Structures are given as C-alpha cells and as structure tokens.
Amino acid sequence: MMPHVARTWGRVGHTPVLLHRCRHRQKVSVIAALSLSPRRRRCGLYFNTHLNAAINDRKVAAFLRDLLRHIRGHVVIVWDRINSHRSRYLNGRLARRRRVHLELLPPYAPDLNPVEWFWQDASCHELANHGIDDLLELRRRVQRHGRRTRNKQQKLRSFIHSARLPLRL
C-alpha cells in the first residue's frame, strides 16, 4: 500500500505532495509469466493476484497448472531462485511433466528476468505517484496494467529484449 514515488511535473513554486495512509501491512501479491511462441512469433503475459497473501510453492504450482493449460508443446521455464521456486513440493510436481524443462537464473540477477521489467514498468507508470487507500483499488490498477500490457506485443518483446536472454524473437 506504500506508494511508489517517481519524478513528476508540478507548477512552478508548488512542490507536488503525495498523501497516503501508512497501511503497509496490506498488500497485493502478483505472480506473472511471459511466454514466447517461436511458431506464432507472439509473446504472452499471464498473471494472478492475491490479496494479503504471500506467493508460496502451492500458489506457484496452481499458477503453473493453469498456465500449462494455455500453452501447448514443450515449455522452458526460466525463473529466479526464490525459495518457492526451489521447493521439493514444486519440483516434485513439475518432474512428472515431461514437456516442462526448468532453468534457473544466476543468484540475484533481476536484470535477466523479463518479468522484472514488467514489474518495473507497472511501478513506474501505472502505480507511480498514487496514494491508494483501498486494497481492491490497488488490485484493480495492477490488473488493468496487466491487461493493457498483455495486448502490446512490442512492449512484451522489449521486456524480453531488455533481459538479454539468448532467445530468438
């Protein structure tokens, strides 16, 4: 609920003031994935939001189950090394799926993660300089940004390009 403060414009002599309530215990957790289809040459953005809950291995497994229903063929999952991605539960569930191959990014390499570029875009544009009082309003803003971004192929490609992963676009 703490607002992201970014540089903004203001009238000469009037410093912009951002008012907010310090409800820092409430949060919206988001899990997201970017996909790249070599055949169709299209990128996809998939995401889920969770109110006042952390993303654990069970939520990651449920998200991947739903994601794999939408994506056909062989899937390579590239992700960072957070604990939920390396859990026994999740790795056991993914080991049974022959079409899924896992690749871990190096430790602390957010610049190599295309989804991190999506988060940065969201926090610097849609969520910047807004003192949001309502948790549902924050969730609506995150979902609106995700839906808008999902339809912008050039922007999704830019996230993948910015990550500098060895992928063909």
Image (cartoon, rainbow, N blue to C red):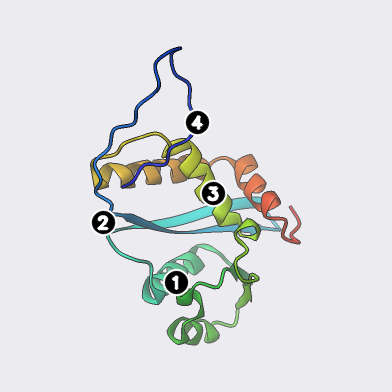
In this rendering, which labeled residue sits more in front, label 4 or label 3?
4
Q: Relative to residue 97, is residue 164 drawn left or right? A: right
Q: What whole-number distance in Å separates the C-alpha atoms at marks 1 and 2?
A: 29 Å
The reply, left or right, for residue 62 in relation to residue 74 is left
Q: CA distance from mark 4 to mark 3?
A: 19 Å
Distance from the alpha carbon under mark 3 to that under mark 2? 24 Å
Circles 1 and 4 in contact, beta carbons < 8 Å: no
Dot 1 corresponds to which residue? 65
Q: Report the mark closest to the observer, 1 or 2.
A: 2
Mark 1 belongs to which amino acid? Arg
**Residue displayed at 44% across by 41% down:** 145
Residue at image mark 2 = 25
Q: 167 and 20: which one is in front?
A: 20
Residue assigned mark 4: 7
Q: Position of residue 2 (x, y in %)?
A: 33, 46
**78 relative to 54 in the view: left or right:** right
Q: Is residue 98 visible?
A: yes
Residue designated by label 3: 118
Asked which quadrant contains residue 76, the reply is bottom right
Going from the N terminus, do you reach mark 1 or mark 4 first?
4
Label 1 sits on a secondary structure element that is: helix
Circles 1, 3 touching at the beta carbon (< 8 Å): no
